[in-house]
Image: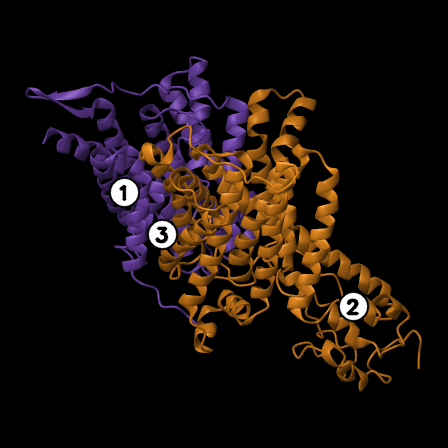
Chain colours: A purple, B orange
Amino acid sequence: MSLFVNLTLNGITNGMIFAAVALGLVFIWRATHIVNFGQGSMAMFTTYLAVTLLDRHLNYWLAFAAALVAGLVMGAVIETILIRPLAGKPALNPVIVTLGLFILLEGMAGSIFGIGSRSFPPAFSQAGLTFGHTKVAFSHFDVFILIAVVALMLGTLALFRATSLGLRMRAAAFAPEVARLLGVRVGRILTLGWALAAVAGSLAGLLVAPTVSFSPNFMDLVLVYAFTAAVLGGLDSPVGALVGGLVTGLALSYVGGYLGSSLEPLGALAILMVVLSARPEGLFSRPAPRRV
Amino acid sequence: MSSIPDQPGVTSGAATPPASGPTVTPVTPVSEGKTGAPDDKLPDGVLSGSGEPGANDLDAQWPAGRDPIRLLDARWLRLPRQPLLRHLLFGAVTAVGFYLLTSSLSAFNNFRIGEIALYTIALAGLSLLTGTNGQISLGQGAFMAVGAYTLGVLMTHTHWPLAVDVLAAIVLSGALGVVVGMPATRLKGPYLAGMTLILALALPRIADKYTVFFGGDQGLTVTAPTPPGTIDPQRWLTWIQLAGAIIVLILLANLTHSRFGRSFRAVRDDEIAAGLSGIHVARTKVLAFTVAASCAGLAGAFLGLSIGVVNTGEFSLSLSIYLLAGMVLGGAGSMLGAWWGAIVIVFMPGWSNSIANSFNLGSAVAANLSLVIFGLVLIVVIMVVPMGIQGGIGWLAQRALSLIRGVGQPRGSRAPPDISTTPDITTGGG
């Protein structure tokens, strides 16, 4: 029973992290109909920047903020240099370019920071909390993860629902041509979408890094789990990303706990194959009619 | 009669092109009533990344025997028109060339040629899947793992002949290709890429989980076949791998020229239109996936034979991405391009090391330079030369040919395509 509780708590924490990365994927998908397979590597790179700053004895939260800002800049630069020229090209081209980005950044991180795994200090204690007399697998750091991701989600919601910028972003995603005619600078909005997605990814990287062995490929699995979560949620719905993240996190936590952690990716593959076979448009997205 | 006709097709050419018979393809009305209209664009077969170069279109322009360049492609020099004959001829020439090459090279270089051959097999399958059928797969490395582990398990637990083991590797990876290909039939590019990405990460972990059966970290030992007579064992293995590569390429080249190949391309270009013309879209996509997976299975079995051991370290995610990069670099949909990609994949670790050493970049860079270079390859090739090396060579060759022949041709009718508007690695789209 306590194993089940712990796995559930662990699944929720992981699910929130997957949701954060999935939210980044959703941002980019909504804006440009591209799945950014470089999302994980970009987050990995900014997390390495943070740990480099920490090595120089910078304040933890300053390093944290620096990584987020670095993500913002990185997302904008990558959109401008690599993604913008691909507009109007076949759908496979951006897939291949973002995959190139994926291994390019991993190779660069390995070259600059070394491939050996190291540790990333957590913001808060990772010791399990005690409720009554039982110690559960839920720490102060896990609470921090929950708060950070919920804040990210609420911020996104507020941005989209309550600001004029969010309205322009929705317009640019919904009908780029019309939005452009109405004076929305669609190109800049797309750049901003990539930048915000990269911030969400960077946050996830900072939250994941203390819980894993930290090496240039530490985001690989997080990325594919987040992709599973995003597809489960429909790939264009922020709420779907949250729910998909939680479902994926819980399911994989149970698979890992009861069947062995090396089967977790296989569990993600199973989820993805079932979702794509039964309901390719995901749980939170309307099927789009195909146009001839 | 003009030895340098200014307006091909205006003199007597208008009547002659159809007379040159089999060279005229119905889709290329090259010189019919051509009066230099600016919108009279010629289809550039070479650039489509698949199918046959459009060299025959050129022939149609010239009245037989009047072309000064005619000597170059006299009938006896032409390749056979029958695709099967042509591919067999290519295969025979390649086989003889490789026989001479392998006989003169050292065992280590033969080992490398064998590796090139096996990566060519995997790349050719992937190239068919992506270039000809428009499906992307990051699972090619995982299917190689299935082939290699099938061979390893069968060699450990049975004493069947090698041919049976290899056949089982092909069949089993092909069967997994059917399973993965089925949900893939409904998926567009990025979904399929994501799903196969997870496959590439997930599948090798099964071997980590069931260590007793799959040998764990040490992996499974594979023994190379014993050669007949006094042939050097490495040379014998290389010959087997080369024979496999040449046979696979001939089969795949024939497949792309068959009814199935046309279905592949039709589905790639427009699924709905293909379905409306009576092509079973899902079946066609699963078939392409299965063929690609079987190729990877054979390549994986050959890789096991080459290195003598099968373990999960060989089949990391980077292998799948390297294969994608090799395919893109060689030219999607091009069987010959597969050789280019394979050469780069086999030699890249060595090149990375020497680059890192000659610039004193340190061991961390040396270990990661391959990743960086392949990442750059994926990005730069797609953005600059989406048709890859083989497509680029074809384009250059066609340019050169049209420069030689194009004396007096109306300018602009054969203008080089703007590089940014060249057809992309698949001409289809989402």
For mark 3, what is the residue? A167
Identify the subunit bearing mark 2. B
Q: Amino acid at mark 1?
A: Gly
Seen as rendered, the residue at the extreme bottom is: B15
Distance from label 1 to label 2 (Cα)?
Answer: 60 Å
Residue located 67% across and 34% down the image: B107
Residue A199 found in image quarter? top left
Residue at 65% from the left image edge and 47% from the top image edge: B340
Horizontal and vertical percent position of residue B220: 43, 34
The residue tagged with tag 1: helix, strand or loop?
helix
Residue nearest the viewer, comparing B76 with A153: B76
User: SS at mark 3?
Assistant: helix
Residue at far front of view: B229
- Residue A185 visible in the shown view: no
Q: Please tell me whether residue A211 is drawn above or below residue B272 in the rendered image.
A: above
**Residue beneath disc 1:** A245
Instruction: Determine crowd level at label 2: few under 14, some 14-19, many 20+ residues with C-alpha closer than 10 A.
Output: few
B61 in relation to A268, above or below: below
- Left-right relation of A132 to A120: left
The label shown at residue B78 is 2
Q: What chain letter is assigned to the residue under label 3?
A: A
Q: Amino acid at mark 2?
A: Arg
- Disc 3 marks a residue whose amino acid type is Leu
Q: Marks 1/3: CA distance?
A: 25 Å
Horizontal arrangement in the rendering, residue A277 relative to residue A130 (left or right):
right
